[in-house]
Image: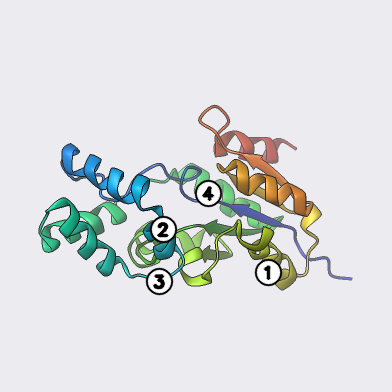
Amino acid sequence: MIVNKPILFCDFDGVLCYDRYWRSLPSDKHRKLQEIFFQNDTMLVNDWMRGKYSAEEINQIVSEKIEVPFDELWKIFVDDCQTMQVSKEVLEKLHHLRSQYTVILITGNMDSFSRFTCPVLKLTDYFDYISNSYHEGLHKTDNHGELFLKYTNKYGVAIKDCILFDDSVKVNNIFNELGGKAYLVTPEQNVQYYLDNLFNN
């Protein structure tokens, strides 16, 4: 009898990577962007992450709001997407765990992640599958974790055997309530810490 491998779900932002979009903007412009975009109009960000806007459309909106020419802003944006830093050691450990788990990168993210970040970091070499909310049209918290069940059903495994590394308390709570085992990634207990524990056990 073939027993399917349990799934190890791993988030991207705040777990594998701490770099921000548009981080190379001058500090005053970046601060204005953060206020407008991530504090005052979070609906726009959420809609982008659900696939309702393209990166070009968002950068056009941002360009007008923070008064930076589109071409200049777009170059900064793409360059910043392509120079995001992820620990090679962490990626290698995740890759190594594929002998025991189906390793899925599950991220609330944008089209720019799939278009510019994934190819440069060669993330498809390290994960069995990459789930991006932009293409799913769903966040991890939607419908009480529907996205997680989509993948446990797809791979024919029980969620009680599956693991999640995520920095969101809300996402972790939902995963635990579904019966899985979620590990909250923090600066003190980072993904490296949890990977080391997995290897040691």
Q: Classify 10 Å Cα crowding around label 4: few (below 14), some (14-19), many (20 and above).
A: few
Image coords of residue 74 (percent x, y): 19, 61
Q: Secondary structure at mark 4?
A: helix
- Badge 4 amino acid: Glu
Report, in whole angstroms, how far the alpha carbon at label 2 lies from the one at label 4: 36 Å
Question: Disc 2 marks which amino acid?
Answer: Met
Instruction: Report the side of 176 relative to 83 (left or right).
Output: right
Q: Do the residues bearing badges 2 and 1 touch, measured as CB atoms within 8 Å?
A: no
- Residue 150 badge: 1
Residue marked by disc 2: 43
* 191 relative position to 149: left or right: left
| Residue appearing at x 22%, y 57% in the figure | 62
Tell me the quarter of the picture where residue 191 sits: top right
- Residue 84 appears in the figure: no
Between 25 and 94, which is closer to the camera in this rendering?
A: 25
Mark 3 = which residue?
52
Between circles 3 and 1, the one closer to the viewer is: 3
Judge depth for marks 2 and 4 and give the one in front: 2
- Separation of residues labelled 2 and 1 (CA atoms): 25 Å
The residue under the point 69% across, 40% down is 198
| x, y percent for residue 110 | 40, 62
Would you identify the image quadrant in which residue 60 lies? bottom left
Q: Is residue 10 above or below residue 5?
A: above
Q: Please give the residue where the numbered disc 4 appears in the rendered image.
A: 92
Amino acid, disc 3: Lys
Q: Amino acid at mark 1?
A: Lys
On the image, the x and y values in percent for residue 78 come to 25, 59
Q: In terms of sequence position, does the residue under pointer 2 or pointer 4 come before the other? A: 2
Q: CA distance from mark 4 to mark 3?
A: 34 Å
Report the quarter where the C terminus lies: top right
Which residue lies most toward the right here?
1
